[in-house]
Image (cartoon, rainbow, N blue to C red):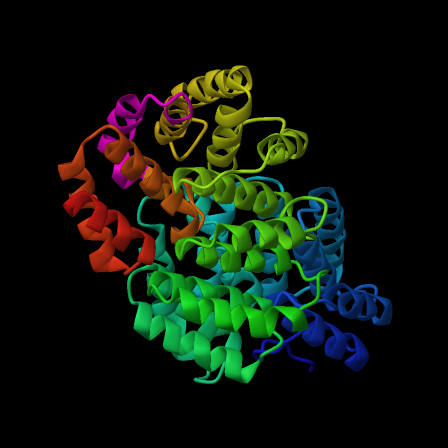
Amino acid sequence: MNADNHGLPLSTASDSAANHYREGVALMHSLWPGGAKALDAAIAADPDFALAHAARARLHANHAEMAQARERIAVAQAKVAMHGAEREASHVETLALAFSGKSREALKSALTHVERWPRDTIILSLPIGAFGLYAFSGMIEHNQAKVDLCEKHAAVFAEDDWWFLTSYGWSLAENGEVSRGRAMLERAIELRRENGNTTHALAHAMFEGGNNHEAEVLLADWLPHYGRNGLLYGHIAWHAALAALERGDADTALAIYNDKVRHGVSHGTPINIVSDAASLLWRLEAYDHAVPDGLWQDAADYARRAFPKAGHAFIDAHMLILEAATDGAAAGSRLAVLDDMVAKGLIGAGAIMPAIGRAAMAFASEDYGRCAQILEPMQADFARIGGSNAQREILDDMLLVALMRDGEAGKARALLDARLNRRPSPRDTLWRAGLTA
């Protein structure tokens, strides 16, 4: 019987279909170009192979092609009802829940599924990562939950399994075990260098450790081999821009943004393009660098086309930052919708969402005292919006800069001391020195 990359049986008698499926899943897990071609070949070799259709649906979802993902998972549901085993039926149903927007049900289904089949990596991957079901659940301790899940199932994976090393290593680094996580990620990249997922995770681990120069060296060497059509090319370049900005090189950060990160040049998904633009442009101004004319408006115009409706915490946090900088009326309208959704219990992240919007509007209008007053009591809730530590640090920065500009030096020093103990940063070191002088 044919098996997948982790030894689980596949309900296809076609060796060709199984070979293409294994290749396609490996490329999908590494976020490397070619996965669609391989999975399409698997389907062509065996049109009744349910898991090949399901993996193709997952790849569509990775590229934010949700209509295609739902269409393809419906085909997988029909095929698995005819030919699939119990694991494959559970696998397909879990993905169908995820692609239909039923995140809570999908998370519950995924966790139940991996209790029985922990080596089913497509399903195990759903709760993990900065944009996974745990991160977007609205829970505060989602980093710990990801570590716990990986630890629970670590024994079933080989020591040289690059996919699991990546998933576990990134989870550890985000949860404060930076050295241990980075060691796993460096081993994973040795095992499979053509791997956007691992390189991305390693950039995060370097950020968490304050190793910005090492991140710049890594990405300068690796990124040209990825190709601009790589799904994470623009976002990984954002990491390089962020590292440059951390050391005060705004010109390099802007050059990277214009050449690789902004919409129109990036092949990334809208969620990355919007969040990368909002966070980088906001940081530029907050760190006392000029944002060239038109960049704010250009990013905001694209963002409103990409996400006209409110309701996704991570996206709305960045939309509100863009709208606060460019269109206060639009920010107010989004806030009104979020207030209503929070009141009805429709947003898992809860009250932090409208709080971020009001804080961003206060910051944009230079009412720094009001900004700090809003954010200070809600610091523990920042994690509820999901994403990575590096992405959410914009909220810590907003509070910190607001305190400094409002003359609250004592509070700012306390925040900086805590951040420097966790992650040494050239920018934070300069800020701390300025508050001491």
In this rendering, does residue 46 appear at all?
yes
The verdict on residue 174 being magenta is: no
Quarter in which the N terminus is drawn: bottom right
Residue range in magenta is: 363-381
The verdict on residue 370 being magenta is: yes
In the rendered image, the vertical position of residue 159 relative to residue 107, given as above or below: below
Residue that protrudes farthest toward the right in the picture: 44
Q: In percent of the image, x 38 and y 52: which residue is there?
A: 389
Q: Where is residue 172 in the image (x, y as percent from the top left)?
A: 35, 66
Instruction: Tally the numbered discs.
Output: 0
Q: In percent of the image, x 27 and y 29: which residue is there?
A: 372
Q: Quadrant of residue 395?
A: top left
Q: In percent of the image, x 52 and y 48: which residue is there?
A: 106
In this rendering, does residue 120 appear at all?
no
In the rendered image, the vertical position of residue 311 relative to residue 413, given as above or below: above
Q: Where is residue 215 in the image (x, y as percent from the top left)?
A: 46, 68
Q: As rendered, which of 207 and 341 lies closer to the eye?
A: 207
Q: In percent of the image, x 61 and y 68: which residue is there?
A: 223
Q: Where is residue 346 in the image (x, y as percent from the top left)?
A: 45, 27
Q: As rendered, which of 385 and 232 lies closer to the eye?
A: 232
Q: As rendered, which of 13 and 423 lies closer to the eye?
A: 423
Q: Position of residue 310 (x, y in %)?
A: 54, 27
> Principal SS element in the magenta part?
helix
User: Does residue 132 appear to the left or right of 154 in the view shown?
Assistant: right
User: Does residue 168 appear to the left or right of 71 in the view shown?
Assistant: left
User: Does residue 191 appear to the left or right of 149 in the view shown?
Assistant: right
Residue that protrudes farthest toward the front in the picture: 437
